[in-house]
Amino acid sequence: MNAHLPHSWESLPALDTILDADRLTELFGNELGGRLRTSRLRYKPGVSVVARVDVEGTGAVHWVAAYAPTGDGRDKLDKVMARNDHETRHGRSGPVLVSGVPGRPGHRLAVGRIAADPDLRRPLIALDPQQGQNLGQPGAPARLLRYNPRRRAVFTDTDHDTGARLVTKVTAGPSPADPALLARLAAAGVPVLAPVPAPGRTWSPHAVRYPWFGSGDLADLAADRSDASARVTALPAATAAGAALARLHLGGPSLIGSARVGVPIVPERKLTALAADLGELDTDLAQRCALIGRAVTAAITERERAGLRLLHGDFSADQVLVERSAGPEAPQLRLTDLDRVRTGPAADDLGGFLAVELLGSGTMEAPDGPEKPALTGALLRGYGAESDLPGPDEILAWAAFHVLARTMEPFRSSAQDWRERTHRQLVLAHQLLEQALQAPSTDTRDVPHDRSAPSSAPPVRVPEAVTDADGSQLRVCRAWPTGTGRLALELADDQGRVRAGEAMPGPDRSWTVHVLPYGEDPRLPGLAAAVADNGRVVVHRHHRRAVVETRDRYVKYLARGRAVRVAELSAALHGQGLAAGFAVPVVLGHTEDRVEFSVLPGRSLHELGAKGHADDYRAACGHWAKLWPVLATTVPGDEQLPEHTAEDEARTLSRWAGRLEAFPGLLDAHPGVVDHLARRIGEDLVALPGRRRARTVLHRDLHDKQLLFNGEQLGLLDFDTAAHGEPELDLANLTVHLELRVAQGLLDPSLQAAGHEAVAAVAETLEADPARLAVYAEATRLRLACLYAFRPRWRHVAQGLLDKLGS
């Protein structure tokens, strides 16, 4: 294996070509007119890779992408090509060049202009078709400043009416910068670069325009070896930047209002996710990153001070624009690029500035103190003149965090020696951590803290992998608390097969795990025989349930006595579902421990969203919006469906809260917080006035995996929990599941919006009470936080749901 390739490259072999300038140039260099160099690389193992391509000699900028082929030999690239062909025919794009990956049948690479960027194409066309077509090409009127494929493009041009020079930032999603907040900050005397209106220009939520300011940024000023006056100006400018940052920190919180502002970073979640990403590249580096990350998290937590500030969120010297002509005595500057503005401790921004300065130095060695590097020292002096400085231990601990947070950058820059560079960053982070532990600490005995002391007990963690009896590794996919302190596990073995197991806690919070053989469960009779007859297990919850896919049906195995009720509910809803227009599985037969269902054609709404099939996803949402009110207002007999009241939902929520509280530390929450949230939301469910209709048909587990679409008809699965009750429950459940998919990175926000529009339409038809819908949504978020806390891959998503409830 070539040294520059990550461990997981075989899952997407096109990465080898993208990281090799010679191979990439051999494929596309003649057409593009020069040697090719990649950067800004984003890599999802086994899924996709995309990068920026610079053409040496011409200055042209393109993108290169590859997607993993599916089983039928097609991939997402086909859709990219189809859309680009349409735009090219209308003169709004440019050709996309496609080549196979040498020696890898079915794998392809594509290179295209910025105008053909799959996610930026439409925003650029909406602004100015001609400008968008030429962006990044030699001789283009608009000069490209930055380009991150499928994320953002920044360029400068001239306002035709006023002659003023403008900088335009175009993003794939709605602009993260809040113009109203930036305008309020500027009006309050904080020197930030605020957006300007552009009369006569097309407005777009994906674009923000700023006035051109200054003659460069602070990083360029400090690095300019050709102009001695520039270096003389750099230190006073850094001091002025420190004072400006202090004014942002101190005055910003009172100006937030209803602006979009991010929440404080939780270092443990950030660094845990980072180590997982790094693990796809190099397991040794990932293990070292995780080890240092835990120590850095502890150092930051121990040094938490009272009070949150309004932070820049991504502060470094290149985010400070400076006007050199003002002279070194009174530099004029603006803080720019506040796309990640959030609240947090002051040391977060200051430590980030120090980290970037150290990473940009040739030595990458930790200083004796945060004030030693020239620019950071000047910045801290300016900050200290306006506000109390955090202790040096805080700043150094946050600097270690920000160095770790950037350990993917060497790989993303396509550096051939990214492993060596990443190792050097890990060494630097460790050195900064040691400096933080040795630095004097600000005395916090008289500083009130806004939260109680965390528990000293070691946190519980669901195991991410376990060892089978034969010594092989099994990946833990899902876990459920059993109510006895144990966990039921669903695992995947090295053949991709679904296995079931049980984990029992030890006195030191370690786990003893017992794994069942594939397709066997003594509490689910008949399962082994079905698997022996070429059935495939698709779900298996230890001793509780299993689903087997056979040649012509799905067979659901349940604990003895439970299958009869499931069959009755499914049969009862079959007719109503068909009458409403849904495709619904037929109950082909049942015994007291199993139910057999017919197979529905199509793919789930979840799969359509995860694979980016936008047209089918929107069509499925439209079908659901038309059909669901018909089914929901069906009035089955009382003997068919049980009643599920708000009190029942409150009890369900309380049970889940108790299950999570039984595993302290599984999420970052103080003891009793989850119980308190469950009680508050439960009281709101029961007490909130409104029409509480108990005759509406409920699915009670309605989410995007329960809906199948085959291009013509929408299918509906799993009536195991069907009842009648308040319509807001199902609508909230589907809405929050779409939020969850976005947080998981499995659904584009534009498709989430389509789903929300469908829910809103159904809510209007059913005359759902908005207040009750909001409370049911809170209940769903808490329930899903408790559920997903037991799934190792999605623990950070569960934490996000809980944080949203507690904010």
Image: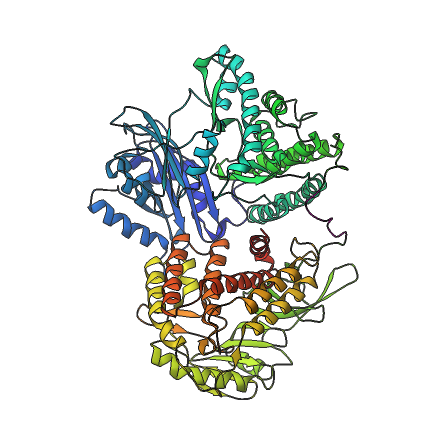
Residue plotted at (54% across, 37% down): 254
The furthest residue to the right: 507
- Location of residue 348 in the rendering, given as x and y in whole percent from the top left corner: 61, 36
The furthest residue to the left: 90
Above or below 557: residue 18: above
Asked whether residue 492 appears in the rendered view, the answer is no
Span highlighted in magenta in the image: 449-456
Q: Main secondary structure of the magenta part?
A: loop
Quadrant in the picture for residue 90: top left
- Location of residue 35 in the rendering, given as x and y in whole percent from the top left corner: 37, 32
Above or below 23: residue 705: below
Q: Nearer the viewer, residue 696 or 275?
A: 696
Quadrant in the picture for residue 37: top left
- Location of residue 746 in the rendering, given as x and y in whole percent from the top left corner: 46, 56
Residue plotted at (47% across, 64% down): 773
Residue plotted at (46% across, 34% down): 184
Q: Nearer the viewer, residue 340 or 109?
A: 340
- Location of residue 371 in the rendering, given as x and y in whole percent from the top left corner: 65, 23
- Is 414 left, or right, of 443 in this rendering? left
Asked whether residue 591 appears in the rendered view, the answer is yes
